[in-house]
Image: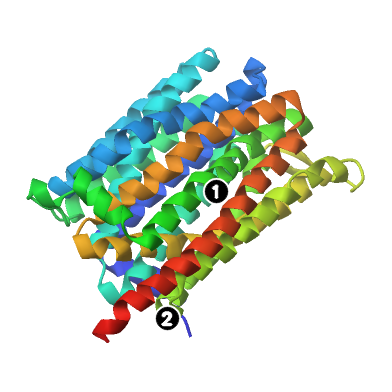
Amino acid sequence: MARVGGSIGLLRNREFAALAGTAFARSQAYSTILIALALYAESFGTTGTIEGLFGTGFALVQLLVVLPLGRRIDLGDAKRYLLAGFVINLVVFAGFVFVENAVHIVLIRMVQGLGASLLWVTGSTIVGEISPDEDRGQWLGAYNQFGSISSLAGDLLGGYLLFAHGFTLTYAVLSAVTLVTFVLVYLYLRPNPGGRKDPDEAGGIETFRQLLSRPMLRALVGFRFTFSVGKMAVIIFLPIYARTSFGISAFAIGWIMAGGKLTKAITQGYVGDLTDRLGHRHYFVAVGAGLYGVGTALIPLAAHFEGTVPAVTIDAFGGTQVLGGAFFAMFGAFAILGVADSIRLPASMALFVGEAEAYDAVASSFSLRSVSWKVGQVVGPVLIGAVKEFVSPEAAFYAAAGFIGFATVVFAVTSVRASRSGAVAAAPGD
């Protein structure tokens, strides 16, 4: 039986606790700002294409920096890069307080992309490097689990703060959480956690070529190019769809997103442990991706259920929340997406780490993982945003589901072939 309580038990390790705090601060800020973007979109009357730039600006910077960043992390002291990421996030929170138009939002999102890259690539790399080999899936799953818990807190607390107190206090709270985590990492994380000193062995062009020579890694990279187009469209446009199409409050949007984050937080550590015991991680990736496509295709049901399902009125937290059929449709769809991510993410991360071990370049592998996502993340929001603008919001989500379905089918075929070729290559040495 999988060790469900293992994620909590890992907090006894002070280094893991500090890294869990990193995931907490990063995810809370990310999810809160997604809700804020929906409020900005309504306030500035943005089009679907401009709303897509909210995501594209964020991803474009990440696409440019993630590969050289992976090399620098392999070469240098990863702890310093982690601390720098916190400082950049503080600058981002200050910038969002003073936005006056959509252009300002795009520019600040670009700075946020840099800070998020530093925290995500560095934090994930350190966890992969310092975790015991036999428990790597659990460590990575638990690390993401705490990120999911934080994202849930960002949805609920961030949504409430935006609803009840506006932008300034919300960003002040995010700054305080970031400062506390900065102190934890500074005090408890070892210097140079897993870093390397030989430039010839860390993240050069030849290292990336060697990594991409592995069939399973190629299958994973190709999958993420297309899958990210659909998933990032959901992440950017679901809060905006809820706000601009149905007038759902920031607090209630937080509840919708919390449905997925709750299922993800509850199950991800368990599934990470399960992948360690059962193996065949590529199957977990394919099943999780397919389920994500199903959940995405269910989001447009919000338009059907709005007005046909009786609304529920809740008076709480200093205001009135009217929850109609659209709210419940999106809540259920996002809950399915959370389960899907729980199945896919730990297996995907463990595969990227395992494939990189032969070349001792975990950070470079995570950089490839990230950059393969960023290509779709740059193109996806604008592409799906154009569908939203010129066809309909519902058509945009169906288009996103189509990208996800295509990516899932291609990965299922290529990963099975890669797994079989790996087994054949290993046979002579058995």
Which residue in the protein does label 2 denote?
277
Is 267 or 134 nearer to us in this picture?
Answer: 134
Report the colour scheme: rainbow
At horizontal 44% and vertical 46% (from top left) the residue drawn is: 27
At horizontal 56% and vertical 41% (from top left) the residue drawn is: 229
Can residue 178 be seen by looking at this rendering?
A: yes
Mark 2 vs mark 1: in front:
1
The percent position of residue 198, horizontal first and vertical second, equals 7, 50
Q: From this viewpoint, which residue is outermost toward the left?
A: 198
Q: From this viewpoint, which residue is outermost toward the top?
A: 100
As drawn, is 172 to the left or to the right of 290? Answer: left
Can residue 165 be seen by looking at this rendering?
A: no
The percent position of residue 225, horizontal first and vertical second, equals 48, 45
At horizontal 52% and vertical 59% (from top left) the residue drawn is: 411
* Image position of 9 with respect to 92: above or below: below
Image mark for residue 244: none
Is 353 or 100 nearer to us in this picture?
Answer: 353
Image mark for residue 227: 1
